[in-house]
Amino acid sequence: MAVTLDQTIAQKQHTLLTRVFASQTFWVVIAVILACLFLSFATDSFATTKNIYNITRNVTFVAIVALGMTFVIITGGIDLSVGSVLCLCSMVLAVTMHAGYGIEVGIAASIATALIIGAFNGILIAYLGFPPFVVTLGMLSIARSLAMVASNNTVVFQFGPDHAQLLALGGGAWLFGIANPVLYTIVLALITGFILRWTKFGRHIFAIGGNEHAATLTGVPVRQIKVAVYMISALAAGIAGIIETGWLGAVTTNIGTGMELQVIAATVIGGANLAGGFGTAFGAIVGAALIEVIRNSLGLLGINAFWQGVFIGGAILLAVLFDRIRNFRRSD
Amino acid sequence: MAVLELTNISKHFGAIQAVNDVSLSIEAGQVVGLMGDNGAGKSTLVKMIAGNFRPSHGTMHMDGKELILHKPVEARQHGIEIVHQDLALCNNLTAAANVYLGRELRRGVGPFGILDYASMYKRAGQIFAELKSETRPRDLVKQMSGGQRQAVAIARTMLSQAKIVLMDEPTAAISVRQVAEVLNLIRHLRDQGIAVVLISHRMPDVFTVADRVIVMRRGRKVADKTIASSSPEEVTGLITGAIEQVL
């Protein structure tokens, strides 16, 4: 009896392989790979160095913000303000540098802006009990408006003494011809993955998303963690804003408009659950990649760009459909 | 000596007297059934022991020392563990993760330590084995039966050196077979010298597993006697008020 009990307890129900096959992220990866293979054969222009360079770089802005959003979504929250925060942070950087300050000052001001906005969102949500949807919807409006105020709604394209450095930061390719934004994304994804899997903080984020009441009862500092996740989300948007500024070489007040929806789509396609409790860094990246591949392929295949929304929306529904089918099977 | 001793404890919320002048003591290795109708003051009493409420009057002593609690965390530091009625489990986490929730093991340096999965799986597995429960540490709680979920919640109380475990309606919403499992879990806690307070509506459970029964009605303690000297009929009478008091 004792032996069989110990054996039962020691048994692993899932092998690595069954877990991989059961994950939505895996099937999205397969979809991305198949789409890429198809496009390589169907068009001459897809598998070119230039196009791959473009795709990987275009993915990064949504991907970086999606990494931050993943934290928020795992706790069961949502951050609609990321597009506007990205814009505001870009503008703070641009205006600061345009005024003659160095790149370090510009980046510091930009990051500080992001953290303050994240803390503001987080405190309203965690301590005053505002619904995340409402708070971040308000911030969506506020942050973009502040960006207009900061720049007087002009386009900033001269970045003072460190102009060249900023452009190199976002537009260069310092390692093996890989675009800089891609390198940043890889580093940030590794950090995110590490935090989620290996730290107490990451574990508590999942606990809050799973059962917030239980997390509170077991002594998890729920409020502090909620503030932290909104700060991380805003920080990710700020970082993406800085990089995008360097890449574009100009900032307008409509940069990042509607980006929040793409970012949420990317995390959901990658396997995060809007009800909370699930999500991975890898999923966020893969989700962003799928969206970009769809966008890119429609252009290369000569399909009218107006169809883009249909395909991206379809991908969202299809990804979640897989998840539903698995759940149905499990409950049978 | 009593593990926990309550002396003339009262609690009122404004004009409402939820608990009125209750004294009781709980010994190590004893299972005490705490019974009473809804609104009798059981939950309020338990919440004072758990550190959720502070008593309006009266004192609590633990191992002879006065016990003053401001927060639930302090109760836990004193060796008072609670199994909540809804179990407070996260369905999206594994059994081991739930057992260690809020006090995860880490290896490495200071605040930068990483989660020690291996040790947590191992220790959780040992606790399940001690509890004689077929619960796998790596399984998600979502897929578990009611009895296994109870085992996970109870395993939490065994992580630290608990002296007293308060269980709020542990058998309220589970199947008959699982009730037997849970009662076995309670016996295992008792056998390790832990005092268990079992808050329950279910007469058979209390009479199966408890050594003593305390009955509350309208905020007062109306009975405190050994199971052997009582009967389900008497306790029912005490709960409803058909029998005024036996002390």
Image (tube, coloured by chain):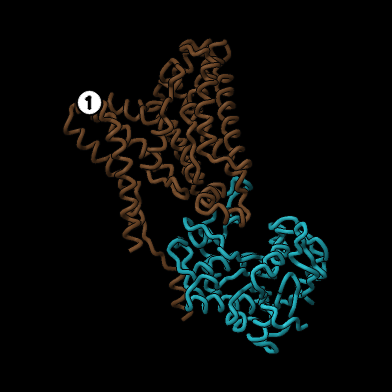
Disc 1: CA contacts within 10 A as few (<14), some (14-19) or many (>=20): few
Outermost residue, front side: B242
Residue B161 x, y percent position in the rendering: 67, 67
Of residues A11 and A324, which is closer to you in this image?
A324
Is residue B119 something that shows in the picture?
A: no
Q: Residue at x 49, y 36 (%)?
A: A79
Q: Residue at x 60, y 33 (%)?
A: A120
The chain that hosts pointer 1 is A
Outermost residue, bottom side: B229
Quarter-of-image position of residue A18? bottom left
Which residue is the site of mark 1? A304
Q: Quadrant of the N terminus of chain B?
A: bottom right
Q: Which chain is brown?
A: A
Q: Residue at x 48, y 59 (%)?
A: B94
Please, what is the three-letter code of the amino acid marked with disc 1? Asn
Outermost residue, left side: A42
Q: Which chain is cyan?
A: B
Horizontal side of residue A64 vs B103, given as left or right? left
Q: Quadrant of the C terminus of chain B?
A: bottom right
Is residue A273 something that shows in the picture?
A: yes
Residue A118 x, y percent position in the rendering: 57, 33
Of residues A244 and B143, which is closer to you in this image?
B143
Of residues A42 and A164, which is closer to you in this image?
A42
Of residues A217 and A182, which is closer to you in this image?
A217
Residue A199 x, y percent position in the rendering: 54, 48
Q: Is residue B206 above or below residue A264?
A: below
Q: Residue at x 56, y 70 (%)?
A: B127
Residue A295 x, y percent position in the rendering: 29, 30
Quarter-of-image position of residue B81? bottom right
